[in-house]
Image (cartoon, rainbow, N blue to C red):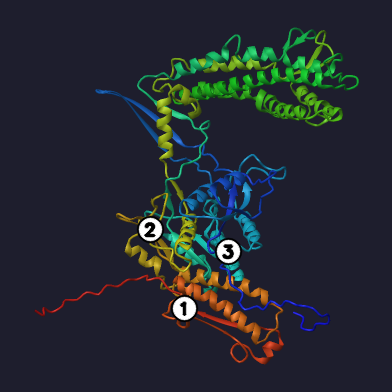
Amino acid sequence: MATTYKTPGVYVEEIVKFPPSVAQVETAIPCFIGYTEKAMNKINGDLKLKPTRITSLLEYERFFGFAKPETTISVTINDVATENGDTRSIVVDQPTSKQPFLMYYSLQLFFANGGGPCYIISVGRYGNDLDEEDAPVTTINSIAKLAEGLAELEKVDEPTLILFPDATKVSGIDKANFYGLYNSALLQCQNLQDRFTLIDTLSYDESSPTDPNIDDLRGVISAEKDTIKYGAAYYPHLETILDYAFDSSKIVLKHYSYTAKAYDQIAAGLEPIENATTGIDATVAKLVDVTTTPGDISGQISDLFLQMYSGGATGFNLAVTFESDPAKKTAFLEKLNILLTSLESLSLLRNSLNDEANAAISTISDEDMVIANNITSALTTFNSNFTAADKIDSVYKNLKALKKKIQDENATAKLLKIVSTDPVSFDKELKKLVEYDPFTSQTGITVSKNTFSPIKANLLTLLDAIKSVSGKDVNNGALNGRKLSTLETIDNVTFNKILTEIYNLPITLPPSSAIAGIYARVDRDRGVWKAPANVSLNYVIKPTVKITNTIQDNLNVDTVAGKSINAIRTFTGKGTLVWGSRTLAGNDSEWRYVPVRRFFNMAEESIKKATEQFVFEPNDANTWIRVRAMIENFLILQWRAGALAGAKPEQAFYVRIGLGQTMSAMDILDGKMIIEIGMAVVRPAEFIILRFSHKMQES
């Protein structure tokens, strides 16, 4: 503030009496690095490899989607005739080929155990809402993408915990690559000194009292004390009550019964498909009907062509000069809606036919593989009219997208592009299905392409193959070979029983996400200095390995390498508890305990941020007093909260700064302000020892 005044007047000077304060940084903000269904805020892909802060599972679902549905859950229905009547049992087994993506389930477990704000880094997407440069991920083949996500995390300041939910599901990964990823995370923690890594074991072996996965972790993870003090490992994996996401249209039922009725159900399902008025053949005739070649053509596709090419009050006159007005667009949309309705009906009928054909294959495959192969071949031929490139399915999808475009557009030039000149336009899409000349008339024409022409013959071949199953199934019930999605309308009671059994299947997850939630809960309720142990886990049925005191002896204290692993155990009447709070540096007196390391992380980061305001301030006694007062006030608050041990503040911590204490005259000349801080952080009572002895009778 200026001290020289030249103009007469009254001047106000504000004198700083209070020292600045230290604001405590967040201590439990995990970052989950893994694979998501999507990564979208406003446009597809705008959040990929971008650390994104969320505060709830609802936000995660909005930006990153849901779990990938399982398709290989096995469902078997057994009907047995007994003296007391018919009984039905339902057996539902774990998916035979589980989806490798655990991010969504891990977030559920995190929030269920007390988690709050966190970061998500999406390194790959397995859904369909993708940008043009992306492609759906079906398997995780390497840790390279996870390593990319870790590199992006280094650019963000707030996260304090690092997790890799999907790392254990990398296809064919070995221990060197798996723990190498965690070594990279530990190095980042060491470099930045403001975060901590939660480490899972690659797998678990519930049959072995000396699980080799423990030795693998200790053998590959870093041995540097200054590195491993920034991480903690937890064992074993956890069985949870979370529900699988599943695709009911991909789950095929097996139904064994003393009364063979599988074909009866198939025959009933074929009736709508063969209906003379609304079946597949009738629907195709509505779409396009060529009476002679050359000759006349009719149907909804040629009606739409005529609307596009003919002139007059309603036609676009595409053959000459494109003309458009609201009346022409309305007339075109009316005919388009009729066409789309028929294509939708055809698609639904075809899906139903596929269900019946697959049910027939499943029904007869254990009786007559020749018939089963015949149905499979006929089904493949029939579907080729729909699923191949530029066939009915893709055109139907594009026509629906074009409908929305033409509804939203009125400019003549843009309408012309939508109708004719864009790569995906009505003219080009319709010509993939039916093409003929001339387009201004439906009489006396020659059809050069008609995708629908083979459908009738292929349909009859497929129906004949399916019907040859009749009378040959001997032990398959009415539900055999049917999709779970179709069962709700056929047998609602059995459908709901199957759903109950599927939801009862436990999902096994690595423990790190639950532990991150525990860290957040304990930090919020007690403080970062409280050990996150002797705390129960929510949504957990049991650990996958039952750990005894003898087994934990070796986990907790590693006499060879000093790498402690925290056990998760089940206790009678208490449930599943976290029963350990050691860092990987379990034999190190300074950094043995997780709360000590994490408290120092918090204190160092908080004081560092608060002290930045003094950069380039005069390096003199006035500044030193303010800095010391600021830090001492912060540490007194921590001492009062119970984080520091000591009956008095001077016994709990010290802050030293000044010439002759922490700095020499040369340090000051070099622009260095050196502050020394010592803290007696409370440590957990890991071993409570009760000593008993006999006492002599005194009276």
Residues at marks 1 and 2, CA–CA distance in whole angstroms: 28 Å
| Disc 1 + disc 2, Cβ < 8 Å | no
Taking 639 as reference, is 33 left or right?
Answer: right
Residue 101 can be seen in this image: no
Under tag 3, what secondary structure? Answer: helix
Taking 312 as reference, is 65 left or right?
Answer: left
**Residue type at tag 2:** Leu
Q: Which mark is residue 185?
A: 3
Between disc 1 and disc 2, whose residue precedes? Answer: 2
The single residue placed furthest to the left in the displayed view is 699
As displayed, is residue 119 above or below residue 387? below
Between disc 1 and disc 3, whose residue precedes? Answer: 3
Residue 434 percent across, percent down from the top left: 76, 19
| Disc 3 + disc 2, Cβ < 8 Å | no
Q: Residue at x 43, y 25 (%)?
A: 492
* Residue holding disc 2: 577
Q: Residue at x 37, y 23 (%)?
A: 257
Under tag 2, what secondary structure? Answer: strand
Q: Which mark is residue 309?
A: none
Q: Nearer the viewer, mark 1 or mark 2?
A: 1
Give the quadrant of the N terminus: bottom right
Q: Residue at x 79, y 17 (%)?
A: 305
Under tag 1, what secondary structure? Answer: loop
Residue 546 percent across, percent down from the top left: 35, 56
Residues at marks 1 and 3, CA–CA distance in whole angstroms: 28 Å
Give the quadrant of the C terminus: bottom left
Q: Which mark is residue 680?
A: 1
**Residue type at tag 3:** Ala
Residue 306 can be seen in this image: yes
Q: Residues within 10 Å of mark 3 (few under 14, many from 20)?
A: many
Q: Residues within 10 Å of mark 1 (few under 14, many from 20)?
A: some
As displayed, is residue 419 above or below residue 233? above
